Image (cartoon, helix red, strand yellow):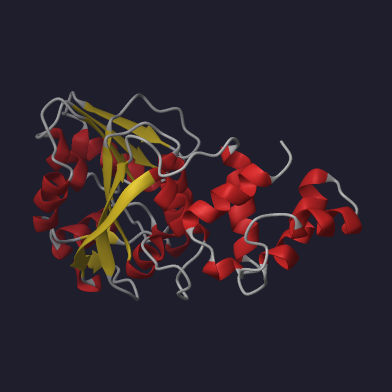
Amino acid sequence: MSLEETKQLLRAYRITPNKLLGQNFMVEPSLYARLCSYAELESSDVVLDAGAGFGFLTRFLADKCRAVVAVEKDPQVAKVLCEQVGGLGNVSVIVGDVLKAPLPPFNKVIAIPPYYLSSQFVTWLFERRIDCAVLIVQKEFAQRLVAEVGSEEYGWLMVVGYQHAEVALLDIVPKEMFYPRPEVDSVIISLKPWKKKAFEVLDEALFLRLVKWLFTERNKKLSKALVPFLRSNYKLSKLDAEKLACSLPLQHKRVRELAPKDFGAILDALPS
């Protein structure tokens, strides 16, 4: 889909791109084949296209695989999407929030999700059984997924991502390939779930809360950073929380110095 075609559709349907919904439309169709190649797309695959927009990637995918689940939150844009893919029997259009809407089964994801949804969407994907996901995301977000321990970009996202999947940064996608043009470049990334997780934890939801909390205190030593979390989640007095925190492994390390597996070890050492 060219830039001019995008502008024509926006004018024809009187749609103004919504910044709050992260509406930056891809205007470089040559990328579609590359996304499919990275996903090793086969004719038997069912693909989720989250943030399907006007459906041009959807149509490309529909010609390459068994079925496409196209999800679009904006009702105005979804109306155009339905018209664009209406004649395709292997495309299901779902209007709504991809994180909340009931979806049919899919085994691969090829999508350009809205930027504001990136963290939630990737975390949501980690909870699903898929073969792989190939996404276009903001460069800054992609760098957080593969950040080195101790770096400024290192945070909860890298820890949780490391546990669930092999993450690879592939190609740079210049901001000129979108309309309206975003402020930063993007990156194609691939997520391939480990056949066996890098490390197991007994309570995934508690693990996510723990890691997110600790990185709000990234420069503190673990023994200090943990106390408010322990008081809140285990209903402990300040004194008991401090005693427990000081009994844990790696208590003298600062949060930013902890490797991903360390967070799993910390959770396992907490009361069940």
Near-viewer residue (211 or 190) = 211
If the image is split into quadrants, where does the N terminus sit?
bottom left
Near-viewer residue (141 or 199) = 199
In the visual, does 84 lie left or right of 33?
right
Q: Is residue 187 shown above or below 83? A: below
Q: Looking at the image, which residue is at 20% across and 68% down?
A: 172
Q: Looking at the image, which residue is at 79% across and 53% down?
A: 244
In the visual, does 63 lie left or right of 260?
left
Q: Is residue 190 visible?
A: yes
If the image is split into quadrants, where does the C terminus sit?
top right
Point out residue 42 in the picture as x, y percentages from the top left corner. Answer: 11, 32
Q: Looking at the image, which residue is at 33% across and 56% down?
A: 14
Near-viewer residue (201 or 184) = 201
In the visual, does 34 lie left or right of 52?
left
Q: Is residue 98 visible?
A: no
Point out residue 212 in the picture as x, y percentages from the top left corner. Answer: 60, 57
Q: Looking at the image, which residue is at 30% across and 29% down?
A: 106
Write down the quadrant of residue 47 in the picture: top left
